Image (cartoon, rainbow, N blue to C red):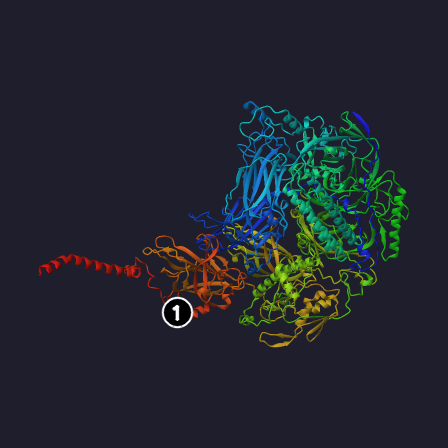
Amino acid sequence: MVFENTNISQENEGATAREPRLLIDTIADDDKTSMASMTVIDQPVTNKRSKPETRTEIASLKAQDFQISVTVIEARQLSGTNMDPVCLVQVGEDRKYTTQKESTNCPYYNEVFVFDYTSSRQIFFDKILTLTVLHSRNLIRSGTLVGKFKIDLGTVYSHQDHGFFHKWAVLTDPSDLMTGPKGYLKVDVAVVGKGDNIKIPKINDENSDDIENNLLLPEGVQPERQRARFIFKIYQAEGLPKMNTSIAEKLKTVLQGEARDLVDPFVEISFCGQKGRTTVKKNCYEPCWNEQITFTELFPPLCKRIKIQIRDKDNLNNTVIGTTFIELDRISNAGDRGFLPTFGPSYVNMYGSPRIYTMVNELSDLNNGLGEGVAFRGRLLLALSVELVDVNSSDLQGSTDVEVENIPPLSELGAGRVEEFFLFGSFLEANMISPVIAEKSVTFEVSMGNYGNGIDGANVSHRSHRSNGDGDSDEDSLSEDDHTLLLRETATIDPNMRTTSPAAKPVTHDKYYYHMPFFEQKPCIYMTSYWHDHKRRLYNSNIIQKIMDKLDEGIQDVQEMIKTNEDRPDRRLRGVAEELINGCVAYSRLVKGTGGPAAGRSKLDRERHKMCLRDIDGIANEVRKLKKRLKMSTYKEKLSKMKTLLQKLKCFCEDPQHSIPDIFIWMLSGRRRVAYSRITARQILHSVCAEECGQHCGKIQTLFLKLPGKKRLGTHGWTIQAKLELYLWLGLAKNKRDYLNGLPTGYEVIRTGTGLYSPPMYLRYQDRQQYELRAHLYQGRGLIASDDSGLSDPFAKVIFSTHCDVTQVIDETLNPTWDQTLVIPNITLFGRAEELRDDPPMIIVEIFDRDTVGKDEFIGRAVAKPVVKMNNESYEPPRFPPKLDWFQTYRGSNKAGEILASFELLQIPYSQREMDDLLLSLWKEAKRKSLAGSYEIKMGIDLEESSKITESVKTDQGHKFIVPRGIRPILAKHRVEVLFWGLRDLKRVQLISVDRPRVDIEIAGRCISSSIIQNYKKNPNFSDPVKFIEDVDLPEIEYWCPPISITAVDCRAFGRTTLVGTHIISNISKFVFRSPDKSKIFTGLKNNGVATETTDVFVDIDHQSTLATDMQIDMIGFGGEEPKTKEEEDSALDETALDWWSKYFASVETLAEEKKKYEEDKIQDLFNEENDDGGMNNDGDVNTLISANDDVQKEKRFGKNFLKGAMGAVMQAKKNFAAPVRRLKKQKEQIDELKIFDTELENCSEFTNFTDLLHSFDLYRGKREEMADELSDQKRIVGTFKGAFRIYRYPLPVYVEQPDAQYGMFKGLPSNEPIHVMARVYIVRATDLHPTDPNGKADPYVVVSLGSNKNNDKENYISKQLNPIFGKAFDFEATFPQESVLTVQIFDWDLLSSDDLIGETKIDLENRFYSKHRPTCGLAEKYAIFGYNQWRDPQKPSQILHKLCKEMKVDGPHFSPGKVRVGKKIFTGPIELEDENGHKKPSDEHVALVALRHWEEIPKFGNKLVPEHVETRSLYSPEKPGIEQGRVELWVDMFPMDMPPPGPPVDISPRKPKSFQLRVIIWNTDDVVLQDDDFFTGDKASDIYVKGWLLGDDKQETDIHYRSLTGEGNFNWRFIFPFDYLIAEEKCVITKKESVFSWDETEFKIPPRLNLQVWDSDHFSADDFLGSLTLDLTRFPRGAKNSNRCTLNLASEEDESSDVPMVSLFKQRRIKGWWPFTAKSEQDELEITGKVEAEISLLTVEDAEKNPAGSGRDEPSPLEKPNRPDTSFVWFMNPLKSLRYLICARYKWLIIKIVIVVILLALLVLFIYSSPSWIMKKIVGA
């Protein structure tokens, strides 16, 4: 061995930290541009960078519950004739069918299908949802495809609200490349996971009928999708593992007589539900396929991932060798200057389980791509290209099936030039090794690909080096070059390769953890490998990664400043923006000019090069503009945009084309693999340019070794198997000279050979740098309960380097206050001083629960980095002293609490006096401020005023150092007021019910107990509700405040107490009262409810609805004022016809308009912002992304015009040219409305969960389960504590209202004695219920219970409905608090089995009853004493207003005609009140109601009062926690029994459908296509008849017009369709049994659509379908006046597709005209196949009885018989007519001519016959 002394100081260029720029403090306004606002802070202000998060468990591997809900609503424009369509819904392999609809091309289904899965997210999101429409399910036409639609579940889940609602899926035929859509299917699709909330928007059906604007496509996907061929070229694979055991290998060798490769590989590609395979290459580790797999799919596809697998062919089961995925979004760009998906030719690396083959592989899931691969499994050379199919091309060939064909091999340099790479590493430290592993010798292995894998690495092929896999292989011996190459690929036989550390047995200092004996001598590893040179990809990624890291660090720093109330976070954000601009400029400078052609450079490389340059330049421009507009008032909005930019940069960081494989570090115990870590090659890749180097290249990094695969789940995955301090360097062999430059100085190189430049075997450090770690652990909060009592005995263990120390144990608490400083001296670290200062080693803090019996139980782990002080550095601000901060702890992937701590690492020697002087000065400064202020402030615990900073305190567990002054929180005297209200729903403890409970409150070591409830069952409230804790020492900064611990105990006989449950309030800021600034007290500004008004404010409320006025939509047009139409004049309200449902449906419409207006305002803001910013110079993708993801709530602006796209540009141009405009306002009926909340009432932000008085705290007991999350942890809830807290500095300033002596700040506290209340529950309806019956339906009914009172409405169950309308009201008389929880359950009725619970919701009525928001009875929009809007509260508005003013001590109310003054606010309103008889009298109720509806505007005491409303509550089932099972709409009224009784309940019973009769007279048809050929004449003719129906089972037919030769038909035939109709829902109601076996009738709701079809009648075959016409009676085109004007526009189904006026038969009642019959041609285009003249009239049942009419031409009111041509008859029924009209009419002249000719011929024959005798007579003279 050669020893080389390299104890030379190495300089680190550019490593000196920049000093932060000076902060300029001014008094300028925050929003103005000043020197203060322009100051840039470009260095971290907080210690956020010291809090890395490390989770040892992967959440994506956990199986969780998912639910897929698909609602098939209807189909339109289906391609085909005379079909009976049925829809197939398929998810993966699961299939469900809709019912079959007969003889229609636009079926209406409205059927719901639900699929439940329990799977990991990765598997679930790859499933394909397929919607298929079939012609029929009959035996003859079963399975005939109309069209299908495919989308993966991941795309649905990633969409807004996890679904698509009322969207049209475009149906296409995969086997038909020439035609377009085959129809449209309207569906709702939602994918819900556990804990997801769905907000299904209330969509207007009229808007959703516009197909083109409501296609089921993700955002950014063009509506016009064309077919494309996805061409995968599979070339070859390398480095495959053997797939047989060693026994099988020997057996095959004996049987076959030769050694062969033990793998038969082939490639399988899965894409969009299709699979393609290559051929199988027998016995080949390095197969060469040269094959092409082609998929044909719509582009862009809605399935975003391509799955590529290499499999091993087996007779029983094909085993997966490796799997990789390609994301289409990462290999394409959909922008204006984008590119189609492209990939390679490039190698893709595959990872999975270790390469040792066993019969049972417990890590086989890793080979399927489930989880992080732990070993290299081989790599595959492939390419992908996409070709769009031109349907107009004459040479269009090919099939839509998956095609496999051979291709020529790739050129030698097609994949790039092979380069030699060198990897070097040194193990500086290895610790935290488990004592179980330490029993044997441990070694560490480093591998890259198959290089370095000494146990199960490369397999030397027994065939030629690159085999084609044919059965007859060349058995010639390998050439010398092949042997050399194979030796290169086999790490174990390379003498110049060292990939494992020497085996050694771990040692320990403290028996907590073991560490490897790497003291002075550090083992090294090194290897040479050969890979294709694509380092440019990695360099680009490294540059972007560094920009991202800097941006992420800056964003987190700003967030920490906001959280800790640091001054001027906008300055730090300005510095972050400046750094981002500089990083983007540096990227452009480094990357420009590197995108040219090179060996192996693919098209994707070139396109990504251009895209990244363009978009990163765009980001820089955007940040420059953002920086200019950055002010104190807008920094939160700009921070949100910076987060969006960070997400965009992440899309550019990872190159999708793999190059160099990842590096694996394995810890081996003997030859058994124990734990691993995986590092991407680019992180340690070296470059001569510093910006292109990997973030860990030539640096010491900390690695945590973890268990492979699913072993990480559960308790085994909670522990770290080992922690490594490792130096790694990877680069080209020609740059090998730089591999030692990053090592800490002061080492000697021990080389393996005699060469001067041979890699070292060891590094020996003679010099040691000594450090001392000080860990200041102050307290913890919210730790996981580890004992059966629901508490823990926590202590902390601090691990740093090879040292470990522990705190003292705090008994029975989840919020321990350790207040302890752990000092760990004599720590030896190796590293550059500047690197250790900026990136020190990590500190591990582990929290354990001390158990007297057995092993201590692990609670959680936090990772931190210390603040490092070098010996040449002063101990002074801003870095020192280190600030305390909360560090999140994790147990697996779940949060396990927080610890308040800080850490400092001091290089020895250091000046203790310097540190003490600084801490003492900080303490004196705080003391001086406290004496100058009005509050008494403490610094930690009471210490003597001396120069002592740190003291040792003796406890029962020994001595400990407390956290020193200057670091510990600055404490101040506070007063804590506790409201003990009561306990609810306490469960049994130790099988004994709780009878005498008590609650203990603990905060900051101070405790107070409530009074004992003497009889919990009789009265669960406390007798003494308010208690105080005086002189509580709490930190001045709320961020550091300790938690509040709530403990409930049961006081039993003989002085025993039993723990009931506990609750921890981690964040107490919501209970803290902050005294307002004295300077702002009298300025009129609101500060925590303290405000005064200096001027009178008038609120003028018109008698008309302001909400309706706000909802009017402004449209811009030309011309003057439009006069009122007759239809508008006739639409005056008939108040006697209005009911509660009128209010409801009007409110639903308003809610939809509000959402639509909000979306339009958002787009308008986006439009304005883009105009203000000027957009981007390139695609504009960045602006769109930023604005679309902006989380800042924008202020709504009334009256603003909606500008969008081209129409927006036109409108803006008209505005600029001052064109005359007129505003058209959508008329809306002025109906008094109520407020519909689309969520639970308590979840609305304006009502603050009704916690203004009472808060509910769940009490937990028992040990938390290992795999429990927040939802499943609810099983531990044993009850609820109701109360509240008020925390404030005491005494309060004199200018603030002082607390009451008895009740403190709980002034006006109501009595908590039992009170009798009448609760009235209105159940309106339920929506989207989860089906529980096998037929996909449910038979729901409602069960409402309050305490022991229960109302079961089972008798009135609604058959086979998932959206039932209940319309029920239930009255309960209850006593609060014993009966305060209202439970609404919806069950499914079953005939034979027990009823199933669909879902339930619970409402805490007590919190509502005592809330200041007054949700007891909602305030109506207007006051009325009769009619549909009758006031239902026993108290009138004036009485309520008097009561509120009295309780709140507000001056007023002072009434005057039409006005009321409350405080200094004046409200106005109507003066007169109208009674039932139309008489008007003066009343103050209107103005009182106006004041109540604006009560939140009352200074100091105002708050929002609950309006008249309907709330929407989610239903959940205990069997499926966290997954919504539907929603129920309801509201609750509460009335105290000591008040006047309320009136009768509001009648909300479901509306009965109104009976109508539809009369359709078919007068004539024209231009009907002629289908048949005449039997005698051969002319085209048709036997026409018309078929019609309305509800589906009421088909009627006219008689037949035979032998129409011109397409004209005459009928004079009347159809009569009686039906029931719901006007508000615009649906026809059908009640019938679904089948013979149905128990009862089912109610169906279908749209009122008149279907007319024209047919050609055939006697000896099936009739021929000619065309159809569908008219929606609520919206259909007005008929043409004559046949010539009847065009294809009249058959349009959308309102905006043509200029044809639309009418509603329910308003016009009668219409006559011509409409076209249509059908699709062979080119799949819509064409007219006939025209019909019809008269359609709508009558009520009463009108129909007064004016009866018969069907067809029957009495009464018979129609005249049509005047048909004489040619209209059946030939075999009228033979004489056949002779007359079929023969005579056509051949009349021919027959005459023939007769004449025959006569002439007869005469001629007669003449000829008689002429000889006549001549003879003449001759003889006879």
Image coordinates of residue 1298 in percent, x first then y, are 80, 62
Look at the image and tell me whether residue 915 can be seen: yes
Quadrant of the rendered structure where residue 251 is?
Answer: top right
Compared to residue 1472, the image places residue 1211 above or below, namely above
Q: Quadrant of the C terminus?
A: bottom left
* Name of the residue lying farthest toward the front: 1819
- Relative to 127, 745 lies left or right: right
Closer to us: 1045 or 25: 25
Image coordinates of residue 871 in percent, x first then y, are 86, 40
Image coordinates of residue 1644 in percent, x first then y, are 49, 57
Label 1: few (<14), some (14–19) or many (≥20) C-alpha neighbours in 10 Å: few
Q: Amino acid at mark 1?
A: Ser
Closer to us: 503 or 1667: 1667
Compared to residue 1223, the image places residue 1075 above or below, namely above
Pointer 1 residue: 1757
Quadrant of the rendered structure where residue 1305 is?
Answer: bottom right
